[in-house]
Image (cartoon, rainbow, N blue to C red):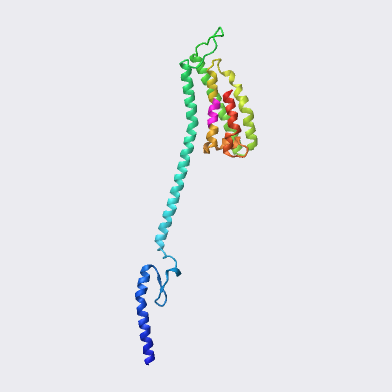
Amino acid sequence: HFTLSALVVVFLSFGSEPAHHVRVEAAAGSTIGPIGFATPRSHVGLPRQPLCSAIVNRKRLYASKDKAEKDVDASSDQKSSSKKTIVGLTALSSYTATTVAAKFQILPGPPGADGTTLAPYTDALIARDLGASLLCAVLGLAFVKAITTLASKEILEPRDSRKIIHTLSAPLFMVFWPLFSEAGGARIFAGIVPLANAVRLFVAATGSEDEEELASAVSRSGDAKEALGGPFFYVLVLLAS
């Protein structure tokens, strides 16, 4: 009986003493073992969050990811739209500046009757050259768009579309040269067409989604940066001519 009583006293004193430590360790983030001892922090994982809190946090994470993706897409669309606007602004400003320069006789007119002087650049000649330039620009855009569309739909191979554009662009442009007047400024109106195409190639080479078809159609490997190679110099030769 004495031995049994001693064991009970020892057990009660042993069990009551760690209880204080159990509370302290639990407050520090440990867990309580099955017999009242505090399990060390290194043997347990992080405390689990309640189910509702985990669901809310997951929804917030998905919402933040969706918002970030939408912001990236909006930024990409804005950049693509701004690059596309560059082509239009280049053509509009070029036509406006050239027309004003011709109107104020800054650009040379046609040769005079004696061949030594220049006749005035009349409004009729300006309208003729402006109309011919706009016609070449529209038809050239339609021609390239038709080829690139056929290539994107895999009706034409990229190799064939590139050869068709390179082979026919210059001859078709030269076919319309007689539509321009004999005025010296007519070459400026005609040069706006390859100038606008050069800007388009530059925009396509910088990764614009709107000109992705053009970059794929004029490059050998489909790399957009190839648009600044041979195709770009090809257009510059047309501009100089």
**In the image, is residue 192 above or below residue 105?**
below
Residue 46 is left or right of residue 138, and the answer is left
- The extreme bottom residue here reads 1
Answer with the quarter of the image where residue 156 lies. Answer: top right
Q: Which residues are magenta?
A: 193-199
Where residue 10 appears, as percent x and y from the top left, is 37, 85
Where residue 192 appears, as percent x and y from the top left, is 53, 24
**In the image, is residue 66 above or below residue 112?**
below
Can you say which quadrant of the picture contains the C terminus? top right
> In the depicted view, which residue is nearer to us: 29 or 182?
29
> In the depicted view, which residue is nearer to us: 162 or 36?
36
Can you say which quadrant of the picture contains the N terminus? bottom left
Residue 31 is left or right of residue 118, and the answer is left
> In the depicted view, which residue is nearer to us: 111 or 21?
21
Q: Is residue 155 visible?
A: no
Q: Is residue 86 visible?
A: yes
Answer with the quarter of the image where residue 60 lies. Answer: bottom left
Identify the residue shown where x is 48% and y is 32%: 86
Answer with the quarter of the image where residue 170 lies. Answer: top right
**In the image, is residue 179 above or below residue 28?**
above
Where residue 103 appears, as percent x and y from the top left, is 46, 16
